[in-house]
Image (tube, rainbow, N blue to C red):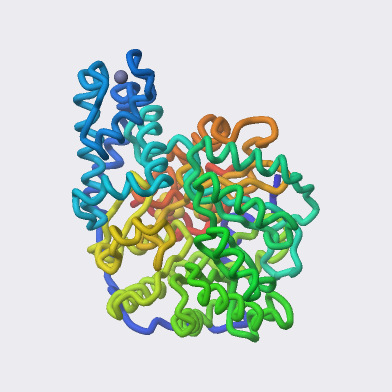
Amino acid sequence: MVKTSLKAREYQTLEIENQVFPKRIQDTNTKTNSIKLDLLIWNFLNKFNFSKFFHLFNKMCPSCGRKFSEIFIDYYITKQISCKKCKYKTIFSTFLISFVLNAVSRSLNIPKKRFPEILRENEPLKRLALSYIEGIGMFGIKTPTVPIGPPVVFWSVTHRCNLNCTHCYVDQDVKEMPYNEACNVIDQLSEAKNFILIFFGGEALLREDIFDLMRYATDKNINVALASNGTLINAEIAKKLKDIGVGYVQVSIDGLKDIHEQIRGKGTFEKAISAIKHCLDEGLYTCIGTTITNLNVHQIYELVDLAKSLKVQKFEIVDFVPSGKASLQAHITLTPLQIEKFSVIVCDIWQKLIEDGYPLTLSYKNPIFGRILSERFPKVIIAPFFKSIFSKEALSYFNFSERLQSGVFSKQSPFSPFITGCECGVFTMHIKANGEVTPCPLNAASLGNVKNHHIQKIWLESPILNQYRSLKFEGQCGKCNYKSICGGCRAKAFISTGNSMTSDPTCMLEIRNIKI
Ligand code: SF4
Ligand code: SF4
Ligand SMILES: [Zn+2]
């Protein structure tokens, strides 16, 4: 267990000394909106348990022996049910599932007739839909909705790394699973209907059998992604990734050359840039990932310009969490007030990108950002069902029919206009190199080990994940009406108090003790 001496309130006193905080380029909206009515209604409905209405979803038809969830989705795709018993028993449910899937296709601007075809053609997407249907069968309709297995898994296949970055939290001294055990993990993930598997590290490319593992996963119809520091990606490796079917590569850039190399070491900037170019040359969906700290926050506008000039598809800003050995670097954390101000700056950049035709997808991985975005953008749509919000304007630049048809990571990731709250137990889970499972790479709370328990069992039965899903947090997060789209960072709560159900210590609502 990682527990640092950093107490919640002490975050306030950490001020930027060495760099100048960036100024806003424009005012998107200086006023904040009041809380949305639909969010209050969702929060109210969440108090009731409707799970018993949906138990049928996970049962088998006694006549044809098929699972009802599969019968529903097949009906949605083909409009046919061959078994008479199923037909009679499922009238209400097939209608309900069709209604929900039509609503999903409508909100994604996909023509009603096209969505069933997309599900038929895209096996992983069909599996994802099944995962949610079966999740509803198990947990009922809730906010957030819990699928039957983790849709997105971060897998730190190795903790070894060829760099030693300032903000790194990874303990390199962790034994790796051998190839056959690692393949068993992929088998488990496939059984748990995993949708996206992110090969993570350390530096994942240092693992000798990395390409075999990636191929093993793509052969199982799992969408494979890679997060890398970029230093080992040359033209040949980029081609190999493409040939294997890797759909998404994220390369870390933590600033312009001076700052990036101050954080990551000499000679790393050019290598990362060249990795990005090789990936783009191969037509890979390529993303720049930046961990934001007080070392690089002043370069945010230049970083967006860099991402635009390289023509990467996505720029992902990740909040720094002083987890693991990064607790020694807690002083580079943005203060709560700075996170609030920085989020508003990201709102401005988002707005500007949308006005410019959305040349670059932008995301900021900090649950608080969802609250700030919804306070400032009246047109943002609340989707507590998926613990997220999305912008209709951003969405309008996405031709989902085309994108989902050609895969999950085509041109721009179809899921990019969504800004999610804390994803632990809702979308994501993390597996360490030794098989230990934690809620996310930065949240060190141990959930079990895939060597002892099936990953799906851990996902469904972990008391910690089920507590997160209940949204019954302590302090401000527990009282806050934004909790169903935000939920606070559980890793930060764990670091500051040793209990991951306490309030996010970096939220201004917590600092000012404001109930919204
Ligand atoms: S109090 Fe918690 S749930 Fe509410 S906005 Fe802040 S971090 Fe999110
Ligand atoms: S605990 Fe939640 S918000 Fe915090 S880093 Fe992990 S997924 Fe993100
Ligand atoms: Zn039947």
Give me the residue at 41% from left, 43% from top.
128
Give me the residue at 45% from left, 79% from top.
311
Give me the residue at 33% from left, 44% from top.
120
Q: Would residue 375 be found to the left or right of residue 260 on screen?
A: left
Report whether residue 504 is seen: no
Is residue 103 shown above or below 238?
above
Q: Would residue 50 be found to the left or right of residue 266 on screen?
A: left
Give me the residue at 65% from left, 83% from top.
270
Q: Nearer the viewer, residue 252 or 273?
A: 273
Number of marks:
0
Query: Residue 140: where, in percent of width, then height?
Result: 34, 30
Q: Kindly indicate the quadrant of the structure image that contains residue 131.
A: top left
Locate the N terminus and report the quarter of the image it occupies.
top right
Q: Kindly indicate the quadrant of the structure image that contains residue 87.
A: top left
Report whether residue 77 is seen: yes
Q: Nearer the viewer, residue 401 or 488?
A: 401
Query: Residue 190: where, in percent of width, then height?
Result: 53, 40
Query: Residue 69: where, in percent of width, then height?
Result: 34, 29
Q: Nearer the viewer, residue 119 or 374?
A: 119
Is residue 425 shown above or below 246?
above
Query: Residue 192: where, in percent of width, then height?
Result: 51, 36
